Amino acid sequence: MFCPLKRPVLTYLPTLTLCGCLLLFGTFLSSLAHPTSLGDGIRHLTLARLLQEGNSFGGWGDVLYSGYFSTRSSDPWFLTHVLLMPLGTLDIAIAEDMLILLLIGAVGITFLLFLRTLRLSPASQSILIALLLLGHVQFTFRLLVGRPLFLMVALTTLTLLTVLHKQPLLLLVLMTIATLLSHLFVFPLFICLLGSLWLLSLSRKRTAMLTFLSALSGLVIGLLLHPQTSNFVHYVFTIFLRVPFLTELDTGTEMHSGIGRMAAVLTLLGACLLFAYHLWYTRRASWKEMHRRGLSLTASIVLVMTLGMLLWVRMLDFLWPLLLILLAQVLSLYPPIAKETAHVLLPRWALLRKYTLGVLLLVLTVNTAKTFYSFSTVNAENALSHFTDPLKNIPEKSRVLNVDWDLFPSLFSARPDLLYARGMDPSYDYLSDPDSIRFFAAVRNPSEETDWNVWLTELIQHIPSDYLALWRAEKRRNMIETLNQNKSLEHVGMSDRIIVYKILPSTEQSAQDSV
C-alpha cells in the first residue's frame, strides 16, 4: 500500500540521522558536571574568554616565559579564538559542551553536503553519517575532547568538494579562512596542490592553474591579515612542519604511532579497494571513469594520510572523514555494488537485511557505550577545583614551572593571570631548547637512580622560576617524597591531581651563582 509520508521521510533521513546523533551527544554531555577533557579545548576557551573580556593578546609569549613562543610570540589559532569569543561568557564546562556540539555539527554538515552531491540513497547516506560519528571509537573520543582542530577538518572536507567541482575562485576564500583559522591550513593546502595535479591530468590546464593560484593567493592573503605575520610564518616553517618527525622523543609526545588504532581504517580501505576492483572487473566502471570522477584524487589523499597515521595517531582526525568520502564515491558509481559483492563473498543467510542492520547497530552501540563509559568514569577528575585551590595563593604574574607539558591547559584555565614554562608538545621544547628535554624526560619516566635534589637545582638553573607544579602519580611517590624534604622548596598547595611548591629565593640564587 502506498504511504504518502514514506518518500519525504526517506529523503530527510540523513538529516534526521545527523540530528539524532547531535541529540545523543547533547544528552550525554548534559549528564557530565565537569569538562570532558583537561586538554586543548579548555585552553582555547579560556583564551576566548579573556578576549571576550577585552584583554589584549599578542600571542602565547604573553603567557609562556620559556620555550619557543617566549622568544617569538604568535597565536597560530588566531581566527579560532575570535570565533570562540561568544562562548567566553559561559561556564567552562557548559562552553566546552557547546563547542563540542558545534564541532560535531560542523563536521557532520560538511560531510552531509558532500554526500548530497553523490548518487547515493538516503539510507546509504544515513549509514555513512552514523559511521562517521560513531563508527570509530578513537575518532568519537577525539570529537568529545573539544579540540577546535575539527573546524579545520570541516574546512578540509569543503576544500576537497570545491576542488572536485572545479570552483577554483572559491578556494581563495577557503584558504584565506584556513590560514587565519590555524596552522593546520597545510591540510587544505595539500588538497589544493594535489587537486591541481589531478586537474592537469584531465587536461584542464586553465582550471588547474586557477586552482593553484587561488590556493596560493588565499594563503598569502591569510598570512598578511594575520596579526603576527612574521612570527607566524617563522613558526609554521621552522617549528610546526618539523614537529611530526620528532617521534623518538621519550617525553610523552602526542606524535606517537596510530598503528594500534587502524583496524577500522584498514577495513574500510579494504572495502574501497574490493568494491573498486569489482566495478572494474564487471565493467561497471573503468579506471579512467574513476579517475575522471575524482576517486584517484581522494584515494591519493587517503593513502598519504594512512601512511601518516602509521607515525602520528592525530592523522585520524582528517583521515576518517576522507576515507568515508572515498567509500561514498566508490558506491556512487554503481550503488548496488555492495550488495553484488556481498553475494559473491558471503553465505546467503548473512545477506538478510535484518542481520546486516543488526551487526551495524551492534557495532555502533558498543562503540558509543564504550566511549561514553570512558568519559563518565573519569569526569570527576576533571573538576577545575583540583587546580584552582592549589594555585589560589600564588601572586599574579608569578612564574610557574609546570614540568608536565600537558598540565598547562588546566593551570591556564584555573589561573590565566600566571606565567607558565611549558604549554606545547615536548617536541616544541626540543626544537627551541634541546637541553631542557632531559629534565622533562626524567619526570615523565622517573627512575629510582635519579637524584631529585640535583635534578631540581639544575632545572632551576636552566629555567629560573618562582613555583614548581607537577602531576601527582603513584610512580612519582619517591620523587615527591624527596621534594617534600628539600629545604629549597616550600609546599603551598596540593589536590588529588597536582602538587605545587614555592621555589625559595635561595634556590634560584644558588643556581645562578653556580653558572
Image (cartoon, rainbow, N blue to C red):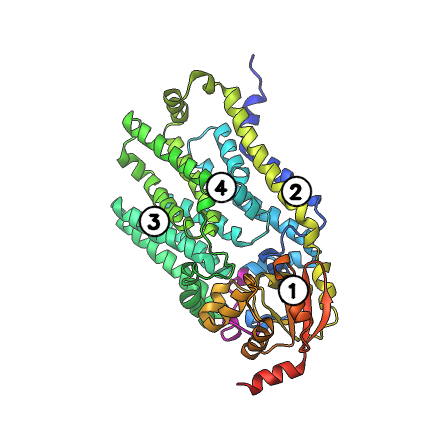
Magenta segment includes 312:
no
Q: Residue 111 carries which label?
A: 4
- What SS does tag 4 mark? helix
Measured from the top left, where is residue 324 in percent x and y?
Answer: 44, 38
Place of residue 435 in the rendered image (x, y in percent of width and height, measured from the top left): 47, 73
* Distance from Cα at disc 4 to Cα at disc 1: 35 Å
Is 74 included in the stretch rendered in magenta?
Answer: yes
Q: Mark 3 points at which residue?
A: 195
Which portion, as a residue range, is magenta? 63-79
Residue furthest bottom as drawn: 513
Point out the frontmost of discs 1 and 3. 1
> Are dots 2 and 1 in contact, CB under 8 Å?
no
Structural distance between the alpha carbons of marks 2 and 4: 19 Å
Say which quadrant the N terminus sits in: top right
For residue 85, what is the image quadrant?
bottom right
Q: Which one is earlier in the sequence, the residue at label 2 or at label 1?
A: 2
Depth check, front residue: 259 or 368 = 259
In the picture of the structure, the residue carrying the numbered disc 1 is 411
